[in-house]
Amino acid sequence: MKAKLIEKKEIAEGTLYTKFSLEENIIFKAGQFFKLKLIDPSYTDERGNERFVGFVNSPSDNKVIETVVRKGPSAFKRSLSELIEGTEVEVGEVSGEMLSPEDQNTSWVIVAGGIGIVPYMSMFRVMKEKGLSLDTTLVYSNTKESWVIFMDELGEYAKDDNFKFIPTMTQDDSWEGEKRRIDEEFIKEKVSSLENSLFYISGTPRFVPDMVKAVKNLGVQQRNLKFEVFTGY
Ligand SMILES: Cc1cc2nc3c(=O)[nH]c(=O)nc-3n(C[C@H](O)[C@H](O)[C@H](O)COP(=O)(O)OP(=O)(O)OC[C@H]3O[C@@H](n4cnc5c(N)ncnc54)[C@H](O)[C@@H]3O)c2cc1C
């Protein structure tokens, strides 16, 4: 289906937010992603003109798509950065199995690295719409604060006693909070109930395998673990 760019802005250093309007309603679930294809882009290279990107809006907002992507040197990213409002793009297949926890009594632990926060934003917005308050621990790792997306919104969610928000900035001298890289010890310290929690992990191909290994070493069972790798980084 065709979509039209209606908004584009840098929401953090090196990170682009885009909003597209749709000709018809789109059906997706919070946590899913889709294929974004540029039509006749300004630049081309061997990496091609389509990428998987996650929805950050709630599925109840089904006339628009909001996305957040890390800027980069590829032809796709340069073309996307230069798109002008009104430009048409193609929205391809929607997929993804990392959806919101079904059991509202679950303790939910999220370990997200940088852009890996994307799938949860749609889930959190649905929770807010429905007035749900799931026992949530969000461990969110970034290099520095200026690169962090959705910090204010996550801070709002953290006002709920059930939402434990643990940001860590691994290379930011001006950040006064947690600075450690996430590892087994970190997770053990921050998560109260390892055995009974449902773990979701997402981020780059460097981040996710290390985190999966760490939680498995801590005894988290495969059935309590979902993860998504943002390939391409
Ligand atoms: C399920 C899924 C969901 C995803 N969701 C998102 C999302 O919501 N947001 C998001 O930002 N990404 C997401 N991604 C990743 C996205 O699809 C791209 O793969 C990623 O953004 C990399 O884009 P790029 O190829 O344009 O490279 P860039 O972002 O431009 O660069 C990434 C790396 O590749 C290198 N590189 C770039 N071009 C070249 C080249 N020509 N030759 C050699 N090296 C090069 C760069 O130096 C850099 O290290 C998702 C991926 C998957 C699989």
Image (cartoon, rainbow, N blue to C red):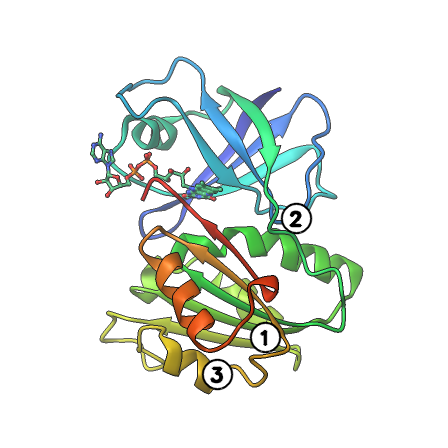
Q: What's the mark number on residue 158?
A: 1
Where does the image place residue 94, in percent across and percent down from the top left? 61, 33
Question: Which quadrant, please, contains the N terminus?
Answer: top right
Mark found first going from the N terminus, 2 or 1: 2
Q: How dense is the environment of label 3, judged by Cα within 10 Å: few (below 14), some, or many (20 and up)?
A: some
Q: Residue furthest top?
A: 40
Which type of secondary structure does the marked residue at label 1 adopt? Answer: loop
Q: Nearer the viewer, mark 3 or mark 1?
A: 3
Q: Residue at x 34, y 26 (%)?
A: 79
Kind of residue at badge 1 = Ala
Where does the image place residue 119, in percent across and percent down from the top left? 55, 51
Q: What's the mark number on residue 30?
A: 2
Where does the image place residue 160, in percent across and percent down from the top left? 66, 77
Quadrant in the picture for residue 34: top right
Kind of residue at badge 2 = Ala
Which type of secondary structure does the marked residue at label 3 adopt? Answer: helix
User: How far is mark 3 from mark 1, CA to CA?
Assistant: 15 Å
Q: Nearer the viewer, mark 2 or mark 1?
A: 2
Where does the image place residue 85, in percent across and percent down from the top left? 48, 26
Kind of residue at badge 3 = Lys
Is residue 200 shown above or below 45? Answer: below
User: How far is mark 2 from mark 1, CA to CA?
Assistant: 20 Å
Q: What's the mark number on residue 190?
A: 3
User: How far is mark 2 from mark 3, CA to CA?
Assistant: 26 Å
Q: Does the residue at mark 2 contact the one at mark 1 (Cβ under 8 Å)?
A: no
Mark found first going from the N terminus, 2 or 3: 2
